[in-house]
Amino acid sequence: MPRIIEGENKNIVGHNVRKYRQMRGLSQQTLSNRLETLAIYICRGSISRIEDKQRTVTDLELYGLSQILNVPIEKFFEPEEPKAADE
């Protein structure tokens, strides 16, 4: 079966997961704990790997992230903003 996502990245939403988590002032562990209340089990290390695009994200996990971070699912698919040249 061919892969849908080519290259080293395993998801296209990780940068926005990190952005919205940080905007809400949540640690990765707190996000993990809150997802658990929805019976969605993603450990802190897996959240880190999602944010670094090293792990895939299921539809159920994306739904839970949307609920906990209070962000419409489609917002996770917005393109990553280019970094400034001095960063």
Image (spheres, rainbow, N blue to C red):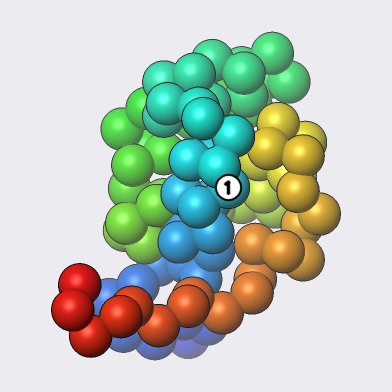
Q: Residues within 10 Å of mark 1 (few under 14, many from 20)?
A: some
- Tell me the residue at 76%/48% (across/down): 71
Total marks drawn?
Answer: 1
State the image quarter where residue 77 is shown: bottom right
**Rendered position, 18 above or below 28:** below
Residue at far left of view = 86
**Rendered position, 28 above or below 84:** above
Name the kind of residue labelled 1 in the image.
Tyr
Q: Nearer the viewer, residue 53 or 3?
A: 53
Residue 64 visible within the image: no
Residue 46 visible within the image: yes
**Rendered position, 65 above or below 2:** above
Residue 16: where, in percent of width, then height? 54, 59
For this view, does 19 lie left or right of residue 77?
left
Residue 26: where, in percent of width, then height? 50, 27
Secondary structure beneath dot 1 equals helix
Residue 45: where, in percent of width, then height? 31, 32
Q: Nearer the viewer, residue 34 or 55?
A: 34
Q: Quadrant of the C terminus?
A: bottom left
- Tell me the residue at 67%/48% (across/down): 62
- Tell me the residue at 47%/58% (across/down): 14
For this view, does 85 lie left or right of residue 20?
left
In this figure, which residue is indicated by the disc labeled 1? 20
